Image (spheres, helix red, strand yellow):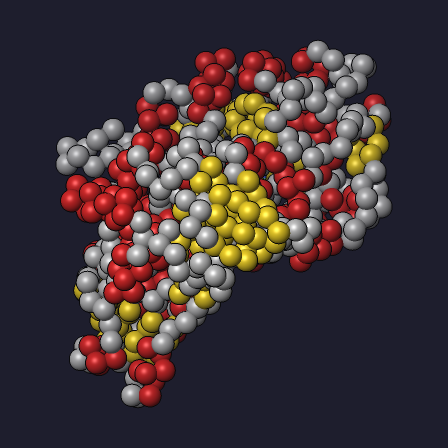
Amino acid sequence: MRTRRGRPGFSHLLTPGTIGPITLPNRVIMPAMDMNVCHDGVVTDDDIEHYAARAAGGTGMVITSASAVAFPVGATSLKEPGLSDDRFIPGLRALADAVHRAGSLLCVQATHHGKVARVDTLQGRPLLVPSAPEGALDLSSLQDNTPDELAQMGAVTAGRTPTYREATEEDLSWLVEQFAQAARRVMVAGADAMEIHCAHGYILGGFLSRADNRRTDRWGGSLENRARLACDVIAAVRREVGDRLAVIVRVAGEEYGEEAALTRQEAVAAAQLFEAAGADAIHVTGWGRNPFRDFLKGPLPNEVGAYRDNARAMKAAVSIPVIAVGRVLPEVGEEMIAAGEADFVAMGRQLLADPELVDKLRAGRRESVRPCINCYVCVERNFWDDTPVCAVNPALGDEQAAVLLPVPSPRHVVVVGGGPAGMETARVARERGHRVTLVEAGDRLGGSAWFSQLTTPANGPLLAWQQHELERLGVVVLLGRRATAESLLALRPSTVVLATGATRGRPAVPGADLPHVQTGDTLRALLTGTSSPSADREAWRSGRTLRWLARAGRLTGATKRPELLRRATATFLPVGKNVVVIGGSLVGLELAEFFAERGKSVTVLEEGAQLGLPMALPRRWYAVRRAADHGVRLERRAVPEEITATSVVYRDAEGRRSTVAADLVVVASEVSSGAPLAKELADRGVAVEVVGDAGEVGYIQGAVHSAWQVARSL
Ligand SMILES: Cc1cc2nc3c(=O)[nH]c(=O)nc-3n(C[C@H](O)[C@H](O)[C@H](O)COP(=O)(O)O)c2cc1C
Ligand code: SF4
């Protein structure tokens, strides 16, 4: 896979490939991702721009979001594409034309959402299911939703409670015909393929899974019976379109989280039946059956190459092409295709983050691909029927905005702070033609996000990408320079952009100054060997072992290598046994898991009612559960009252005074924005902007988006 110059090559990914009657220019497919921008089922210009941008970026084929074959019946949103009437054809045709003009192929994903057809509930219809659901879903994760989030989720169905109806023979004949007619419309619109959705709990997937299908008629029981509905749909679609459309079937290679879930063996056997029924390709996804608990297992896995084994098993069992999905990074995809584990790979979130992925690989510019950081911000909004935003790609949903207009008269922009906000400002300003100098107090770029790699490794590639782009663009980076008004004025800036990050304080309780109490800043300074006058002063008050650890790290260079630091601290972290984290937000929860994974006994004290804010919902649910699985004691509505040399005293949710042992106290609360230099500079007549946490605490998404807005306006 390596080229002669030692860089990864992508010859397998970039080779054309065939699915039934169509040939894709390369092996990279964009899988279905809801954009929720249709109007009453009609494709809009926003849809077209979104897909055309991915097509123009070199993607071999783009698949639309799930589209409802019986719209609005069986739809999950009125903003998803409809396929149930000829009135939907012109929009689809405009989409197909735009994608073709951009050099790619279009596949339309078709489904009936079955038990998740929220529009049916909204409009007062029962949900069509194989069997009435048994037992209640575990909804305990929802305790960490804010009232606003709960209200938005409830509003999608106007707060109505779903009712269910077991499908009759008549319903199933109707459904098969709906798919066939949908395929005709897709074909007439000029698309190249249709993907039949047989996963994620939608109706065909429901029939396939023992956990949803307890029927005793010819549609239930044996695998053949459970796969019958999907096979009938495939055959009917095939009859309708002949070989004028490629017919792809999306199936879970495995379902997760329940005893009776679909197994890999069953999924493979079903794929063989789908092939016999006329499918041209199998697209192997995965599904965690309870989205509030298992969403990070599927359909949006947390792990890189999560469904690789399932794709490999499928590939060994069928003779039609197999499409693999699930955090497939380019290197993983290349390896899988080279090894014969898959024929095509679908990259979802990665193509939201960077529509030009394929073109960049083709041009040998792998390092310029903006990485997805697996933060789940995009999909969160699907929970309330909204359009995704991307934490790292602010142009998602507004592709015109991705075009950075050159400035008529370049000026000197000085950016203070080398975290994600500072680097994004510098990148965009420089890309537009300004001369840019970035001043950073520390000895490296990345700011507090550099430290976050210890707990969230997926943040690392974003920093590496930003740094690479600054080098490529020729931004002047001055490290180890603590900015003052004088030093900035000496640089003769036209504009100064302050991206100096948040301030992290201590709680106003007795004992908050004790040596074993660390704030985010002091902990970062200690573990990464970085320094700032205040952090140094504070860090010095910390325990002797921690100081020793920091010195050892600095000498060995470990403090500059997150992977090494992660591994080193996994075997040796002399902070005592008991760790109390004050503040159970995103950072607090991740730190808690970090310490718990290293064998510490960890307690999180969160004053609010929810943990994990502002993590995107599915990741929040997962993080809270993982922390609990690691044995972290999680206390919501817990107010610290005093810190002693060996404990933290707090008022618990019931108002009782409780005490928890603490050898180390980490303060992850008390984070506030602020940029004191702003006033000083403004008073001296300098144009100043503030971005990132210095302006408003918003972590990586807030940092990148605010920086992008400001840099585009300079
Ligand atoms: C915002 C969003 C919406 C999605 N909507 C759909 C959908 O409509 N149909 C579907 O089959 N999968 C959907 N998915 C799942 C993706 O198709 C894909 O399988 C998943 O994101 C895993 O691939 P990735 O790790 O490359 O992102 C969605 C994913 C995202 C991020
Ligand atoms: S929002 Fe986060 S998970 Fe979604 S595509 Fe962007 S970076 Fe990836």
Question: In which quadrant will I find the N terminus?
Answer: top left
Can residue 564 be seen in the rendering of this structure?
Answer: yes
For residue 295, what is the image quadrant?
top right
Q: Residue at x 33, y 71 (%)?
A: 498
Query: Is residue 684 placed above or below 558 in the rendered structure?
Result: below
In this view of the protein, which residue sits in the foreground, 439 or 582? 582
Q: How many marks?
A: 0
* Image coordinates for residue 545, horizontal then vertical, percent: 28, 44
* Image coordinates for residue 194, horizontal then vertical, percent: 58, 34
Query: Is residue 192 placed above or below 644 in the rendered structure?
Result: above
Q: Residue at x 55, y 36 (%)?
A: 628
Question: Outermost residue toward the front?
Answer: 645
Judge from the rendering whether residue 531 lies leftward or rightward of residue 601; answer left or right: left
For residue 139, what is the image quadrant?
top right
* Image coordinates for residue 397, horizontal then vertical, percent: 51, 57
Query: Is residue 465 placed above or below 704 in the rendered structure?
Result: above
* Image coordinates for residue 481, horizontal then vertical, percent: 20, 67
In this view of the protein, which residue sits in the foreground, 349 or 502? 502
Q: Residue at x 70, y 27 (%)?
A: 206
Q: Residue at x 26, y 60 (%)?
A: 536
In this view of the protein, which residue sits in the foreground, 584 or 655? 655
Question: In which quadrant will I find the C terminus?
Answer: bottom left
In this view of the protein, which residue sits in the foreground, 671 or 40? 671
Can residue 197 be seen in the rendering of this structure?
Answer: no
Judge from the rendering whether residue 275 lies leftward or rightward of residue 709; answer left or right: right
Judge from the rendering whether residue 92 lies leftward or rightward of residue 321; answer left or right: right
